[in-house]
Image (tube, rainbow, N blue to C red):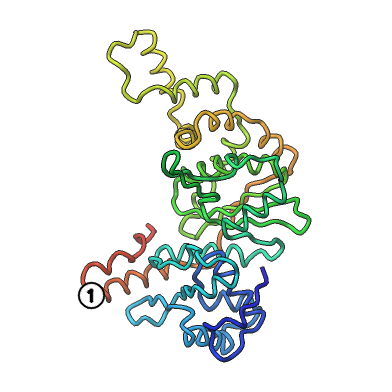
């Protein structure tokens, strides 16, 4: 997305180049944070004086806040927070403006690296962008309740957030193939399963798509688990008998009544054994949000047929950078702050180090 930010009153007196403005817009839409090497990669320059001047320009204009890592604070992640800058790209209330913990900021750096690594597609970042694009692309072929969403509250006081995962979606110039980014954060692919189910109606409507799972080096050993989870959900739709039995089972109370008949108790016990795997746990989570439509969606053969025709695929990609040193420096920074500010500073120390 190319946006002209050179006229923003929040910038310094020196004008921002189009290249710098495009990078800043990319950051604001997809992560809200960046490090110097990412601007160097975007601009195709060495990480030297030009990168330093660009960052100093933003710091002088109070457009970014440095998140200092390590015992000395020399390693920094830069958070873009100025509301006029976000307003310049039509996103004055974008959530990336909000203060962020260091561990969450590092995850956002991973997402930004995934975006910067693929210039062949146009990336959509905000809910507004995605809604507008897919409404124009699909028209009335997809209802509002079939888009990825989370619903909060009860009628009539209901809030709906579309594309709640806040992850980039890219489309090629011809608008045929679409790329859905997912960031692996844990060894278990349970949340990934829910992500697939939440987006399944959308990808079924598109016809040509790629789900690209980004893995930091510490989670590369989990790639097969993610591939298997995707294959199970996408390539093995539920049979008719499974669909009917699962819909019945999900409607049963967690604690059955004491006067339940022996036959019903046996059926319930058999259903528990049949539907105790992680695939069905993910379907249950989606069913809680969307009702029986979640079960019928898991029975749809559309995704399987699309995969068989090689119009879709699931990619597992190892990110080319090491982020563990940032987590280690974050723990050092937390200890440094804790010595001067108390234990409340320990909340941004990041996850524990990976086991060797």
For the point 53% across and 78% down, which residue is it? Answer: 36
277 vs 6, nearest the viewer: 6
x, y percent for residue 7: 61, 83
Vertical comparison of 96 with 130: above or below: below
- SS under mark 1: helix
Q: Residue furthest right?
A: 174
x, y percent for residue 166: 52, 56
Vertical comparison of 266 with 83: above or below: above
Which quarter of the figure is the C terminus placed in?
bottom left
Vertical comparison of 278 with 180: above or below: above
Q: Find residue 69 and report its image quarter.
A: bottom left
Which quarter of the figure is the N terminus placed in?
bottom right
x, y percent for residue 293: 55, 31
213 vs 249, nearest the viewer: 249
Mark 1 Cα shell of 10 Å, populated few (<14), some (14-19), many (≥20): few
Q: Find residue 285 and report its image quarter.
A: top left
For the point 68% across and 48% down, which residue is it? Answer: 209
x, y percent for residue 206: 70, 44
- Left or right: where does residue 312 sit relative to residue 168? right
For the point 54% across and 33% down, which residue is it? Answer: 294
Vertical comparison of 18 with 166: above or below: below
Q: Which residue is mark 1?
A: 341
Q: How many marks?
A: 1
């Amino acid at each position: 997305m190319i946006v002209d930010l050179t006229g923003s009153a929040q910038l310094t007196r020196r004008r921002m180049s189009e290249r710098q403005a495009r990078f800043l817009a990319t950051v604001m839409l997809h992560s809200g944070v960046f490090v110097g090497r990412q601007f160097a990669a975007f601009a195709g320059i060495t990480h030297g004086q030009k990168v330093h001047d660009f960052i100093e320009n933003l710091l002088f204009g109070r457009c970014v806040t440095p998140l200092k890592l390590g015992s000395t604070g020399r390693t920094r992640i830069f958070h873009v927070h100025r509301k006029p800058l976000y307003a310049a790209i039509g996103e004055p209330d974008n959530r990336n403006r909000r203060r962020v913990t260091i561990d969450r900021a590092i995850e956002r750096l991973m997402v930004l690296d995934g975006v910067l690594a693929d210039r062949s597609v146009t990336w959509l970042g905000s809910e507004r962008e995605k809604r507008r694009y897919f409404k124009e692309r699909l028209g009335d072929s997809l209802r509002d309740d079939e888009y990825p969403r989370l619903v909060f509250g009860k009628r009539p006081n209901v809030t709906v957030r579309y594309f709640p995962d806040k992850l980039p979606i890219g489309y090629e110039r011809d608008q045929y193939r679409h790329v859905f980014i997912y960031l692996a954060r844990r060894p278990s692919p349970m949340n990934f399963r829910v992500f697939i189910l939440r987006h399944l109606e959308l990808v079924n409507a598109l016809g040509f798509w790629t789900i690209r799972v980004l893995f930091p080096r510490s989670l590369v050993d989990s790639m097969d688990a993610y591939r298997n989870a995707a294959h199970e959900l996408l390539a093995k739709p539920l049979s008719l008998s499974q669909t009917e039995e699962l819909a019945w089972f999900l409607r049963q109370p967690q604690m059955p009544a004491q006067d339940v008949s022996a036959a019903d108790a046996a059926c319930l016990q058999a259903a528990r054994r049949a539907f105790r795997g992680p695939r069905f746990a993910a379907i249950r989570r989606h069913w809680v949000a969307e009702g029986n439509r979640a079960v019928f969606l898991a029975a749809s053969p559309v995704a399987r047929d699309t995969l068989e025709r090689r119009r879709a695929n699931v990619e597992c990609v190892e990110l080319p950078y090491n982020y563990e040193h940032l987590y280690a420096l974050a723990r050092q920074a937390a200890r440094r702050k804790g010595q001067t500010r108390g234990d409340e500073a320990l909340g941004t120390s990041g996850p524990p180090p990976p086991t060797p």
